[in-house]
């Protein structure tokens, strides 16, 4: 799957008045382009741990928010790109999938107060009075800086569902004996008794996500068996994910006292400095059951009531014990709060003095899940971090899975989404 849009395709498909320069390099996945943007959250309004999945023509809204650490008032605008299931621009024009303005300014922005680190908080809820979405499918939300020739600032994936089928998932023991203790396998049935299909194997494709991640999604899965008004996705060793282990936790809801895994909290040069206890590698260690957020995070403060505007920022020092550097590997702090990406901002460096890897990240008060991921130093194209090498895998790990059903009949110009479900591996 290509990860960067062709600018020529974008210009042809969408009716933007803007012209992207080649240096903008617009991404078709979750990405933050500038260092001053932090704490990007995207979910169903009121459900802070939900994924950005919107039911078409429902009363629900998606809530999108972020902080600008420059603490000024910029002219940010947002727009939408309708995409095929492979996240390339669809053949629809904006008039076909949007009702309202194709581009609109952020109207809801406020300045922080009672914080050491100043910032501007931006929010967006949609559908709203300015824009409504008319088609189901994949969408890319693009935030641009009007004052910088509409350079992209943030891109975020979300999906719009027109529920026309029923999905029944089931966790099964992995077919391969070598994976029974380390992986999780999923079968599912799709009922379409009120939705006639002519050629399900050609018209239907499924995508399966683990913990809301697109970087390691299993894509393009066709029905294996067909029954009357029913499609069975009952593969052997195909819809299989490394189970991982429960995520590590950063509980930084208060900066007045230390909590779980935090060694010290200090105020240095008008900035909070938080040092974590030294983490150990868990690959090869016994499985430990604990509650986590499946890699997600929430913004929350026990020190102030208004989390969005009074939650402060701190430089958090993550430390991973390792007697020797991991040969030919780069190590990263990974989680939803880093977009599951391996970027210079969350890359760790080896410190011989403390025998471990360290990384310092600016983090807003809240509750965060994180893990340590690696990639080969020579692999410049790596998209998905390897969590197994440091964290390990265990089949009893509680994960959250999402199944999305795409439908594209013969002659249609875009991929519809006719069903989606999110469930836990173990209830």
Image (cartoon, rainbow, N blue to C red):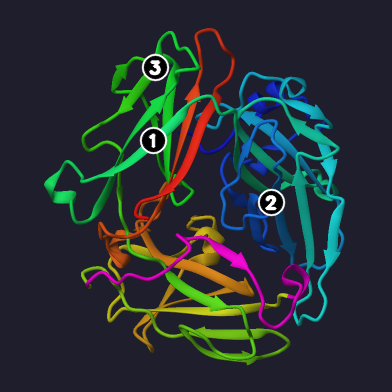
Circle count: 3
Residue 135 magenta: no
Answer with mark 1 or mark 2, whichever residue precedes in sequence.
2
Visible residue check, residue 84 = yes
Q: Which residues are magenta?
A: 286-310
Left or right of residue 14, residue 156 in this image: left
Left or right of residue 129, residue 269 in this image: left
Q: Residues within 10 Å of mark 1 (few under 14, many from 20)?
A: few
Q: CA distance from mark 1 to mark 2?
A: 26 Å
Split into 4 quadrants, where in the image is the N terminus? top left
Q: Which mark is residue 279?
A: none
Residue bearing the label numbered 1: 168
Q: Which mark is residue 45?
A: 2
Determine the secondary structure under disc 2.
loop
Provide the major secondary structure of the magenta segment.
loop
Q: CA distance from mark 3 to mark 1?
A: 14 Å
Answer with mark 2 or mark 3, whichever residue precedes in sequence.
2
Residue bearing the label numbered 3: 229
Tell me: residue 348, above or below residue 37. below
Residue at screen point 46% across, 29% down: 166
Q: Residues within 10 Å of mark 2 (few under 14, many from 20)?
A: some
Q: Nearer the viewer, mark 2 or mark 3?
A: 3
Residue at screen point 72% across, 71% down: 307
Q: Quadrant of residue 87?
A: top right
């Amino acid at each position: 799957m290509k990860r960067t849009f062709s600018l020529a395709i974008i210009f042809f498909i969408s009716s933007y008045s803007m012209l992207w320069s080649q240096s903008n390099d617009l991404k078709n996945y979750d990405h933050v382009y500038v260092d001053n943007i932090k704490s990007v959250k995207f979910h169903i309004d009121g459900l802070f741990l939900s994924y950005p999945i919107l039911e078409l023509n429902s009363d629900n809204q998606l809530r999108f928010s972020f902080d600008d650490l420059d603490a000024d008032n910029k002219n940010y605008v947002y727009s939408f790109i309708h995409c095929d299931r492979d996240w390339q621009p669809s053949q629809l024009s904006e008039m076909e999938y949007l009702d309202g303005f194709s581009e609109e300014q952020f109207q809801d922005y406020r300045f922080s107060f009672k914080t050491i680190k100043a910032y501007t908080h931006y929010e967006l809820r949609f559908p709203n009075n300015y824009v409504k979405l008319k088609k189901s499918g994949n969408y890319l939300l693009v935030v641009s800086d009007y004052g910088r020739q509409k350079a992209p600032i943030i891109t975020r994936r979300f999906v719009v569902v027109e529920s026309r089928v029923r999905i029944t998932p089931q966790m099964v023991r992995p077919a391969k004996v070598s994976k029974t203790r380390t992986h999780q396998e999923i079968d599912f049935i799709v009922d379409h008794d009120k939705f006639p299909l002519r050629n399900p194997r050609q018209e239907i494709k499924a995508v399966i996500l683990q913990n809301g991640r697109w970087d390691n999604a299993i894509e393009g899965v066709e029905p294996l068996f067909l029954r009357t008004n029913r499609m069975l996705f009952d593969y052997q060793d195909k819809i299989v994910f490394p189970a991982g282990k429960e995520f590590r936790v950063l509980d930084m809801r208060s900066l007045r006292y230390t909590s779980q895994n935090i060694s010290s909290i200090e105020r240095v040069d008008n900035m909070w400095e938080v040092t974590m206890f030294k983490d150990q590698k868990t690959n090869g260690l016994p499985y430990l059951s604990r509650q986590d957020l499946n890699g997600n995070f929430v913004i929350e403060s026990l020190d102030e009531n208004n989390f969005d505007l009074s939650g402060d920022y701190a430089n958090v020092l993550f430390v991973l014990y390792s007697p020797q550097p991991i040969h030919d590997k780069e190590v990263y702090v990974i989680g939803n709060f880093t977009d599951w990406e391996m970027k210079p901002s969350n890359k760790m460096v080896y410190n011989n003095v403390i025998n471990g890897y360290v990384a310092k990240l600016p983090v807003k008060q809240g509750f965060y899940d994180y893990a340590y991921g690696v990639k080969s130093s020579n692999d410049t194209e790596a998209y998905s971090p390897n969590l197994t090498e440091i964290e390990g895998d265990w089949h009893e790990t509680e994960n959250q899975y999402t199944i999305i059903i795409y439908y594209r009949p013969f002659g249609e110009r875009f991929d519809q989404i006719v069903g989606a479900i999110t469930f836990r591996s173990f209830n």
